[in-house]
Amino acid sequence: MRVALVHDWLTGMRGGEKALEVLCERFPEAELFTLLHVPRSVSPTIERLPLHTSFVQHLPGAARHYRYFLPLFPQAVERFDLSRFDVVVSVSHCCVKSVIAPSAARHLCYCLTPMRYAWDQFDAYFGPARIGGAASTVMRRVMDRMAAWDRATADRVGRYVAISHYVAGRILRYYNRQAAVVYPPVDTAFFSPDGGSPAGYALVVSALVPYKRLDLAVRACALARIPLKVVGVGPERRALERIAGGVVEFLGRRTDEEIRELYRRATVVLLPGEEDFGIVPLEAQACGCPVVALGRGGALETVVGGRTGVLVTHATPEAFAEGIREVRDRRPFDPADLRQHAERFGRQRFGDEIEARVRQMAAGQPAV
């Protein structure tokens, strides 16, 4: 079985890359295709595979500003030569679900989400309040074309597997396709408690981008009078710094070991945005730390309200501040219970389930 793995871009080890890493382990003879690869930005397990990039790799400034070239992505994706492969597995949150596989090949898409900015989150990325009225008008036309292309190419995929039931619903809504669900991997062997005590701070681990709604976390921590540590980088940092006052410490990029220690010492981890799944809450729970999350999207599948955290009904600083107080002052959470819940989402489980799906498809067996 000749397998091609396809990923949108490789610039860091986020949730999608961690799923790709397991696929690289399960299919070690595969070859990897991606629009752009920043060397040493992902794990050696991924980078040891034969790796093919698109023309985006050679565009000026692409390593840092690849999103500026978004209108070129469809053309780049469609130029990948997959003619040598029997099976194509795309790990897609943007464009690579639309690769052109050989007619005899079978294509499974592990869909992280349909393209957010082309469908239901345009304003969060390209609205007038973010980039100005004229630029937003131009981007609206670009994204309308991207959405039309995204929908028109949805049937290039033989089978969809979604990262959550929430994403399966989006796949049905935008692509009119059914999707099985396989939850992404959480490294519960690595993320674990150490028996220490919380140090009295709230924690966010996130890309600093608009839809994550980190402004809610900043304002909520000010209301709840709790220090906030923020791990992550992104274009929203300056805007967040302007509203942070003295309550927030921006830590930038951190190693996995440093993040694990931050989880272990945090009083609460915050998830203020509507997530497609959300690995961070499960990493936190694996370390014995409760979560306060917006009660929408993937959080409904990863956080058990009252048992592993608090699900907040309203996306307001006041509601999140009340959730923080609930965790900090009024409700005890059992670290062993938190960890037991997180272990349901472990890495071995993901590998077994996704490999079985790929091999079933390759053998022509019906989807289950």
Image (tube, rainbow, N blue to C red):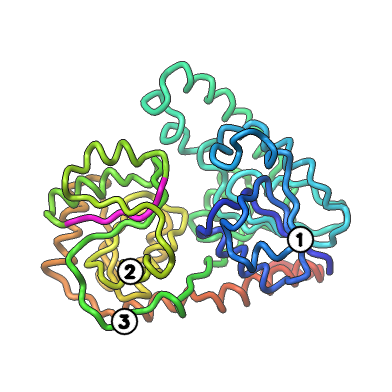
Q: Residue placed at 59% from the left, 42% from the top?
A: 63
How far is the residue under mark 2 from the one under mark 3?
Answer: 22 Å
CB contact under 8 Å: marks 1 and 2:
no
Q: Quadrant of residue 105?
A: bottom right
Q: Which residue is mark 2?
A: 304
Q: Earlier in the sequence, mark 2 or mark 3?
A: 3
Q: Amino acid at mark 2?
A: Val
Which-is-in-front pick, marks 2 and 3? 3
Relative to 348, does residue 177 appear above or below in the rendering?
above
Q: Position of residue 359 (x, y in %)?
A: 75, 72
Q: Residue placed at 84% from the left, 69% from the top?
A: 1
Q: Which residue is mark 3?
A: 194
Left or right: where does residue 124 sit relative to residue 107?
Answer: left
Q: Amino acid at mark 1?
A: Pro
Q: Residue placed at 60% from the left, 45% from the top?
A: 94
Left or right: where does residue 36 sit relative to residue 225?
Answer: right
Name the quarter where the C terminus is drawn.
bottom right
CB contact under 8 Å: marks 2 and 3:
no
Relative to 291, does residue 250 appear above or below in the rendering?
above
CB contact under 8 Å: marks 1 and 3:
no
